[in-house]
Amino acid sequence: MESAKHKAISDGWIAAEKTPDEEARQKALDHYCILDTGPAENFDHITELLSRQLGTAFALVSLVDKSRQWFKSACGIDATETPRDMAFCAHAIWSDKPFVVLNALEDERFRKNPLVDSEPHIRFYAGMPLITEDGYRLGTLCAIDTKPRKSLSKQEEDILSTLAKLVVDAMALHLANVEMKKQSDAKSIFLANMSHEIRTPMNGVIGMANLLGKTKLTKKQGNYLEAILQSGESLMGIINNILDISKIEAGGLEIDEHVFDLHHVLESIKNLFMPHATEKNIEIIFEYDSRLPLHFIGDSGRIRQIITNLVNNAVKFTHEGSISLEVKFLSKNKDIISLEMIVKDTGVGIPAEHQDKIFDKFSQSDASTTNTYGGTGLGLSICRTLSDVMGGSICVDSEQEKGSTFTVSLPLSIAKKSHIDQAMKATKNDDMSDKEIKARILVAEDNLINQMVIRSMLESFGCTVDIAENGNVAIELVEKNQYDLVLMDCLMPEKDGYQATEEIRKNKKLAGLAIVALTADAFKENQKKCQEAGMNDFLSKPLQEECLKEKIQQWAR
């Protein structure tokens, strides 16, 4: 590139002209999404190394912006930017090799420069332009000192040039991470939208089926209805697995620790699969080690998810013989017990060459498995991740045509008596919840079928129900009528649930009105969005009667 052109600012101080490709250069700089970002260790390590190797007071990764130079990393100085007209780096980006000023007081371009005349009193400067693969000069890696020098050695020039290439690589890595984050965000938005689009009609299907089950049906009709419900629950299981995978990839999977009865959880899983196993002439055996207490502190939901998946697979792949679910004591360290939950079957087994792959996402033992037995290949991958997140592990031992043994090892905290008593008290309070709920509730929901489902559920509890088909109508009704609770769908036409809630919260007279979100978006981020909008709580679709009733009892005033 040609040498820098200059324009005089004042006597003894000359600023560099902007480069001929300035507009494209600026677009390239913006493309890297690095300006005004926080500190990063990889950049800081480079400036620290340069400062040590060249023995200078300061070292900078300086990016030349429209009217400033901004420091992505600054070693030895607290400044974050300086005006571009004063910048030595604005001169350096014109160069193809290290740009060196041995003594700024003897250089007509800089001797009266404010950065020379006053803090930081620059005397020596050596900067290597940061040149991208496309040839754009975005800034410099530079070493600066308050003392002049007589020379910069060839070895020092090579160090500066090499480290400048590392800075360019670090910028490329930063860009790749930004792009990856964008893709991850786009995926999360897509999955959230898909979750909403699928869960909304599923709420209608399962909800109406449950309501139908409360009417008088013939035995044949009851069987048909049971098939509908089983198919709906199966579909919801697949949807939840896909959402769990996306949460795992986004690092958003959370563990909800609470007091629970492990024996009861596992026995209920056995009872759940017993009818299906009996149809196949398969026995399910449940054994619980007598050395183990009943109550632990942990995430019973995630443990149920793991063992349900394993028992479901065992029933699916076993055609004769038996299935056993055994819980074994391993060791105790203070209040932590290490235990194993073992699911063993006499099914088709897994070929040795496929056993390493079965815990991978979207993987099954072979292609024919999907055709014969169905499944997405997500369940075991989720089991492994959940085991890892809870501090445990999962492994398999299998022999083809003889069966498989899956072992889940987990550390669990023993529940103290005070914790158990508190949990039992909460359960008793729940058991007293069968009486009618005399509450007036506004339901803001645009889907006609879901309106019917929620209205029927609420009226069966004893509630009086009004319906608002969008956020604007909801605002009008809460300002005109007195409600004990608002159930607010998040996505509605005209004005959505978030906007409607924010509007309601502006009215001080309605400050005490509880608003519970109804949403088909099951992501944690959505719960946060609901809270930020001013909602008190969160209910995920498809709605379950017991969960809906619990929220009403909690929030209806």
Image (tube, rainbow, N blue to C red):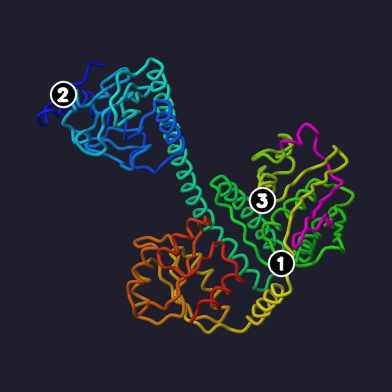
From the viewer's side, name the closer residue of 137 and 260.
Answer: 137
- Above or below, 136 relative to 313: above
Q: Is residue 484 visible?
A: yes
Q: Position of residue 405 (x, y in %)?
A: 83, 46
Q: Closer to the observer: label 2 or label 1?
A: 2
Along the polypeptide, which appears first: circle 3 or circle 1? 1
Q: Where's residue 357, x and y in %? A: 71, 36
Residue 119 sits above or below residue 553 on the image = above
* In the image, residue 252 above or below residue 354: below
Labels 2 and 1: the sequence-earlier one: 2
Under mark 3, the amino acid is: Leu
277 left or right of 527? right
**Does the magenta run of residues contain 427?**
no
Q: Which mark is residue 386?
A: 3
- Please name the residue that numbered disc 1 is placed on: 260
Q: Is residue 73 visible?
A: no
Q: Judge left or right: residue 479 versus residue 463.
A: left
- Tell me where the magenta segment starts and ends, as one range: 328-357
